Image (cartoon, rainbow, N blue to C red):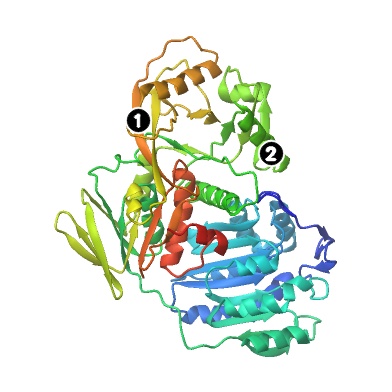
Amino acid sequence: MNDHPLKVEHHNTTSDGGSIASKDYEDRYFQDNGFDESKEVYIDGNDLEERWESFSGSCFTIGELGFGLGLNFLTTMHCWLKKERSFNLDYIGIDKKILEKKNLVLLEEAFPNLKKEINIFKECDVVGHNGFECISIPDLKIRLILVTEDVQKAINDICISNIDAWFLDGFDPKKNPEMWTEDVLKAVFDLSSSDSSFSSFTSVGRIRRALLENGFEVNKVPGFGTKRHRIVGRKFEKNKKSNEIKKIAILGAGLSGSNLAFNLANSNIEVDIYDALDDLSKGSSGGPIASMYPKFSLDNSPRSKFLIASYFFSLNFYIKTLGFENTGLLFYGSDETKDKWISKILTLKRDDLFELLSDDKLEDLLGLSQIKKALHVKKGLFLQPLELKKKLLGHRFIKIILNEKYVSFTEEKNKVEVHFKSGLSKSYDALAVCTGKGLKDFNDNLKVSYGQMAGISNKDLFNIKMPLNHQGYIIPKVNGTNWIGSTYEQSADFKKENIEEKVKLNHAIFGNKDMSYEIQDLWEGERVSAKNNLPIASKIPGAKNIYCIGGLGSRGLSYAPFLAEIVSSAIQDKQIPLGKEIFTLLNI
């Protein structure tokens, strides 16, 4: 059993130049004319292109059991891209093994007609980890949610029953029986939307009967190629899912609120975002610099899975959607605890993500220092929060209202009335509260701590090329200044000597222990975190359309985009890109 989300299983494939097969299951992933098979069995078997023409919802959701090498997803994308769509596509792919770029190379050789779609997929930079991995392609209105788990656990962990079409594409039931159990097939029905469909290459009697008993209408139709039969089916119920959220208010224009505003605006929802301060550069999210923090847990706990899912989703959002640069990060084992953490990370054998650097390679990144070895985290970045917020809030569907302090809100029927100190009152379809320590009004498990960062401007010192984490951190120069941090203090009565110790530590690391220095700039702020060391992203208890995000602590940059994705999904009745167990832990 894997003991960490990044310790994964790989597809063990063999290929004769055309057909690609699994050595583990002794079965082909698809026939030689796999594209035609995928199109006929799954796209046409679910009448997708015809249903898309008349679909009136905001998001169409496909679930696949047996994601394999991703051919059905690529075929779906191929059909989806034939014309502009007015709604979004969610694709949930379940498999026990991760997809790798070398698998896509095999597909590229076998299916040159899918070259465009394969290149798009390659650009998504799929990490490959156990649990839920969310890959967003907003320009194409596509979101891929890969769930890498045993099938029963994976399907039990899906949060919302909104799947409009199923691709039941596990290996032969005799060779892959766990994919075709009665419990799995019951969950397929339970997770289906009111007018869902399914299609499958198989026509095995017990599978057909199980689907019938669970409530599907099942039909046997001609099979593909040399196969005699396959099955398709529909679920018919009266209730239709709908999306009524057209305009929303967000309280708090920090990292959480700004990311949520951007996410919702990208779904064509009008957003009014309010902040009690008169400038976006003020407040806890107004620091001069911020760096991602990839200090993952060393176990396989729900928190560990969340940290990894959030970190890599957020990183890809910054790079792929907003255009920030991947710089990478360094971790120095400056004490026994950090040294053990680095050693454990290296045992994961994820050379695509981590490497141990020493000697000349390290000197090239840091210059002369006392550090003899450090962990290079290949995916990570730092940025200026104000620049980030301006990018996020520049969307045409977002209106910024500053210097407005909310007093209260009330909810009646399908509307939320928000009242402000100035006397302003406005009505919205939904409300999101992202007010930092203001969430303590709803949750007394939140705690506030405080911290300082010091700005040092010296052209001859700290000419590093990427952030260095140790007992604190130091960031490469931005506008001639290195920022060093951060202290952890229990009150807002800041002690300058605490940040001075951090500065002295960095001088010592870089061989300048006795050098005099001057702190040119000082930033002070607060962090809000929850006592279970997980953030909050949920509906407020007892409310219908009031949500909240908070408790990000010192990981705001690594959390905010993913939490925004979670809450935006909840608001729009889209699939939650996180397992049910972890999502429950994020409730306020």
Q: Is residue 356 left or right of residue 281?
A: right
The mark found on residue 533 in the picture is: none
Residue at (61% x, 21% y) in the render: 371
Q: Earlier in the sequence, mark 2 or mark 1?
A: 2
Q: Is 279 left or right of 73, judged from the image as shown? A: left
Task: Estimate the x, y position of residue 50 in percent, counting from the top left.
Answer: 54, 82
Mark 1 burial class by Cα count in 10 Å: few <14, some 14-19, many 20+: some
Q: Can see residue 446?
A: yes
Crowd tier of the residue under label 2, counting other residues whose Cα lies within 10 Å: few below 14, some 14–19, many 20 or above: few
Q: Secondary structure at mark 1?
A: strand
Q: Residue at x 59, y 54 (%)?
A: 302
Q: Position of residue 213 (x, y in %)?
A: 66, 88
Q: Quadrant of the N terminus?
A: bottom right
The residue under the point 32% across, 54% down is 441
Residue beneath disc 2: 344
Q: In which image quadrant can residue 111 be found?
A: bottom right
Q: Where is residue 483 drawn, in percent x and y?
A: 43, 27
Residue 480, relative to residue 289: is it above or below?
above
Q: Quadrant of the C terminus?
A: bottom left
- Quadrant of the rendered structure where residue 204 is? bottom right
Calculate the distance from the C-alpha at mark 2 to the C-alpha at mark 1: 34 Å
Residue 303 in the image, given as x and y percentages of width and height: 57, 51
Q: Nearer the viewer, residue 19 or 162?
A: 162
Numbered label attached to residue 523: 1
Which amino acid is tagged 1?
Answer: Trp
- Secondary structure under the numbered disc 2 in the rendered image: helix
Relative side of 579 to 21, left or right: left
| Looking at the image, residue 560 lies above or below residue 27 | above
Q: How many marks?
A: 2
- Which amino acid type is shown beneath numbered disc 2? Lys
